[in-house]
Image: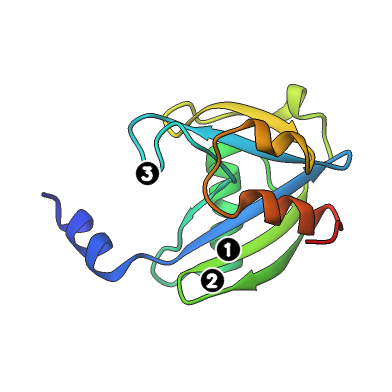
Amino acid sequence: MKLHSIIFKKYKRKVALVVLTYNQKVLILKRSANGSHPNKWGFPGGGIDHGETPKQAALRECIEEIGIKPKNLAKLGANDRITWFKGEILCDPSKCLDLDYNEHTEWKLVDSQSIYDFETIKGMPELVRIVLHEVV
């Protein structure tokens, strides 16, 4: 087992996740079979590197995973491990997304109802409703 894997399991690396909107819908990504939460749908994001702020990590992860630097990035909330952000995609995702296929195999835009059509990571439907300004 790699040292990184041992450390990650023991200390639960902190992560930053981003709920991105485009035309009143939220971007979700289907995770690849070889990563964490295999084949489930999630948001862009990942581990916070040493010396990096959660916001810096959120921006870096978006660029790495979808090829876009989100606009109007704002903190939604945090717990001891996860910091959630919301942001906007200003371009048509079908024309500007550059998906990292090592991490994700598909992307979709969803609303607060269609999110239930996907096998998501726990808590995602509630975050979609919050970001789209619907009562939870």
Label drawn at residue 53: 2
Which mark, residue 36? Answer: 3
Ranked by sequence position, the earlier of labels 3 and 2 is 3
Instruction: Label 2: state its secondary structure.
Output: loop
Question: Residue 102 at x, y = what percent?
Answer: 42, 29
- In the orientation shown, which residue stands out farthest toward the bottom? 80
Q: Tag 1, which secondary structure?
A: helix
The amino acid on which the numbered mark 3 sits, given as a three-letter code, is: Ser
> Which is more foreground, mark 3 or mark 1?
3
Q: Looking at the picture, tell me which residue is in the foreground, 1 or 98.
A: 1
Viewer can see residue 30:
yes
Give the residue drawn at x 72%, y 47%: 20
Real-space Cα distance between discs 1 and 2? Answer: 5 Å
| Depicted 31 relative to depicted 125: above or below | above
Q: Nearer the viewer, mark 3 or mark 2?
A: 3
> Residue 22 falls in which quadrant of the image?
top right
Q: CA distance from mark 3 to mark 1?
A: 21 Å
- The vertical placement of 106 against 60, above or below, is above
Q: Residue at x 54, y 71 (%)?
A: 53
User: CB under 8 Å between callouts 1 and 2?
Assistant: yes
Q: Quadrant of the C terminus?
A: bottom right
Q: Crowding near pointer 3: few (<14 within 10 Å), some, many (20+)?
A: few
Q: Residue 56: which disc?
A: 1
Where residue 86 sits in the image (x, y, percent)? Answer: 73, 58
**Callout 1, which amino acid?**
Gln
**Mark 3 falls on what kind of element?**
loop
Mark 1, Cα crowd under 10 Å, few <14 / some 14-19 / many 20+, is few
